[in-house]
Amino acid sequence: MVTKDKPAKKVYRTCGPGDLEILTRDGWSLTKVIQSDRMIDVQEDVAAYDEAPEGSNSGYRNPGWQHTSIMRKVVVMDTIFLLEKDESTVIAELEDRLKETEAKASAANVEKKKAEMELRDAKASHQFVVDESRRRNEALAKALSDAEELRKTKARMEEDLARIQRAVGELRVRDILGAKT
């Protein structure tokens, strides 16, 4: 609580020229501009035209443009801005961000639980399909085995029937031949 005896606490921060506009839009007030300069070494490539001395042999030197590097000192000006904002405003903004983050985390947690349930259901469905397929394959294998057994039994019965028919035919032939003699 701000009273005459107790002024509001301030929160300070610094920024460069690129962030100043954004921060002032967010409610930060410019308190002070701090400028500093520093020296740095810069390497530069330069080209210079070099003429051969008079009366010299052409193999003595290569006249023409020569490229070389030089080092020079450069003064760099840095500008830093000191900004301030009421502590209560900063705390309120941080609490709002915290609430937003918690809401997003809660929504993400709900989505995660929903996805986990869908995954569990998909796994159960997959397992059901696998089990059902296995049961059907076993039933088909048993039906195939039974069909093969029936085919073999039918073939044996047909063989037996053919033997019986041959025997009956032989008996008729004997009966016919026996009746004629």
Image (spheres, rainbow, N blue to C red):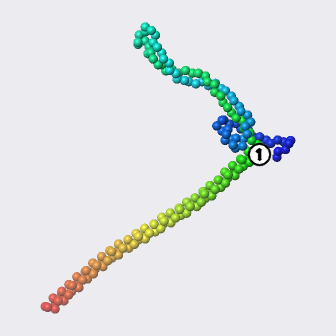
Seen as rendered, the residue at the extreme top is 55
Q: Position of residue 4 (x, y in %)?
A: 86, 42
Query: Closer to the camera, 84 or 91?
Result: 84
SS assignment at label 1: helix
- The three-letter amino acid code for the residue at tag 1 is Ser
Query: Along the horizontal axis of the image, is 120 left or right of 17?
Result: left
Q: Position of residue 62 (x, y in %)?
A: 44, 15
Residue at (43% x, 8% y) in the render? 55
Residue at (74% x, 36% y) in the render? 31
Seen as rendered, the residue at the extreme right is 5
Name above or below for residue 96 compared with residue 136. above
Query: Closer to the camera, 84 or 101?
Result: 84
Residue at (67% x, 54% y) in the render? 103
What residue is pinned by disc 1? 88
Name above or below for residue 80 compared with residue 43. below
Name above or below for residue 106 compared with residue 29. below
Q: Position of residue 81 (x, y in %)?
A: 70, 35
Please count the marks in the image: 1
Crowding at mark 1 (Cα within 10 Å: few <14, some 14-19, many 20+): some
In what quadrant of the picture does the C terminus appear?
Answer: bottom left
Query: Closer to the camera, 172 or 109?
Result: 109
Q: Quadrant of residue 176 in the image?
A: bottom left
